[in-house]
Image (spheres, rainbow, N blue to C red):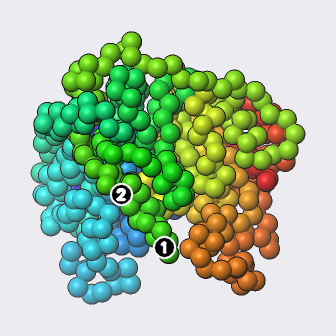
Amino acid sequence: MNGAESLVRTLVAGGVDVCFTNPGTSEMHFVAALDKVPGMRCVLGLFEGVVTGAADGYFRMKGTPASTLLHLGPGLANGLANLHNAKKAHSGIVNIVGQHATYHIEYNAPLTSDIEGLARPMSAWVRTSPDAKSVARDGAAAIAAASGAPPQVATLILPADTAWNEADGVAQVPVESQRRNYSPQAVESAAKVLRSGEPTLLLMTGSAVTEPGLALAAQIAGKTGCKVMGQLASPRMARGRGRFSIERVPYVIELALAALKGFRHVVLVEANEPVAFFAYPNKPSLLKPEGCEVHRMTSSGENSVAALQALASAVGAKPADVKPQATVELVKPTGALNHASIAQAIAAAVPDNAILVDESITTGRGFFPLTASAAPHDWIQNLGGSIGYSTPVATGAAIACPDRKVICMVGDGSAMYTIQSLWTQAREGLNIVTIVFANRMYQILRGEFDGVGAGEPGKRAQDMLKIDRPTLDFVALAKGMGVPGRAVTTADEFNKALAEAVAEPGPRLIEVQI
């Protein structure tokens, strides 16, 4: 077999059986190998940002890495924004990036570039295979890196001649890194803080905000009186009826400072220390109160559920200590569309075991409290802040969990970054409802203009913030890519559109005209 086939067979044998692809000339032998070798599902994306974002969403729901296939340096560069988001979320991905044949690179052909230099900022592991006999072994190492503790983005660069030359065969993936346990000393330190009775915040993300982790946190909070919150964004959070509902650290600095005021201690469970998303004149970067001590109990890659179990035992917390939480009766709204009625409609429409992918940014800031009373679901958020993540992530999540309905919530500005995702969703018949909030402007940036004290925007500034002249027609865009859609202007229309979209298989789009 040639190098490309040895790599595909190694990927499949190593449990990487989905490849999100956007190939070019240098990857044709790899494409041929994907065609020849059974066991690999190939999903085409029409833009590399869709490919890398889908691999991120796949990992967040499946917990095992998918692969991508990207064309040379420019193809990788097109996918870097969503690899940035994946890196921040600790998603495991195996990127296969084509390269010119080793002997062709010296001629500086038009597509020649420093691919390793492009890959390193967003990848924890980067390697270029020097020859065909190294390809399978390098692929196995990439799988091991992507599957490690913590998981990470691994990028393997495949020169064309290493793909077409003769190889040795399949390589065995090194034994997968076991999830690191936790530090008993760190748990005891956290228990000591909780036993002190001083105001303490348990700030969590990662595996801590899965259903088992949240259940343990509820016991600890009930026993000790500590507050439990999630960081601003988490890769995946269990939410809905019957699950311990926690607030997030707010995005707006003034709200975050108010939410964190009074705490003497913050115990980090995989979370980062709370900091402002951006710098603002005369506003702090660190959001913790002055004099507040920060204690790290677990980091990403450690077993936070086991650590929370140990912490619960250390403070004597039991299931009986859980305090009941207030629930909100979900009623379908009527009348005008506004942030409150939109949140009500979505909360009422969420089906059991749904996956919600959130890039609603401005419109969606008020969704979180109401959806706590929705049917049990998983909530996916953007840790990296690079927009255009939600529709690709929803695509990958739907491929990872074909039996679950995915609801993607996105602003119109963000949606245009990776609108090509709709085509892939139609081609693959994915069960995704995309809700586009048509603000007709980059609403988040209008608020930021005021937040940084830039003054009152004039005509040219406003033209850079508004999305009009012409107005985008998302129903027409969706139709052009094979996704049925409809626009709504009232809460009653939105209720009906949601009910129909959730009930029907395959992709649907709803444009919410605000």
Name the side, left or right, on which 336 lies relative to 343. right
* Residue 329 location (% of width, % of height): 69, 23
At x 46%, y 62%, the residue is 277
- Is the residue 126 above or below the residue 422 in the image? below
Q: Amino acid at mark 1?
A: Asn
* Residue 83 location (% of width, % of height): 39, 59
Which residue in the structure is indicated by mark 2? 290
What number is the disc on residue 282?
A: 1
Viewer-closest of 193 and 393:
193
Name the side, left or right, on which 31 lies relative to 169. right
- Is the residue 39 above or below the residue 417 in the image? above
Viewer-closest of 53 and 274:
274
N-terminal of the two: label 1 or label 2? 1
Viewer-closest of 219 and 391:
219
At x 13%, y 58%, the residue is 134
Q: From this viewpoint, which residue is outermost toward the right? A: 335
- Is the residue 495 above or below the residue 317 in the image? below
The reply to whether residue 181 is visible in this rendering is no
Name the side, left or right, on which 180 lies relative to 152. left
The crowd level at tag 1 (other Cα within 10 Å; few <14, some 14-19, many 20+) is few
* Residue 17 location (% of width, % of height): 34, 40
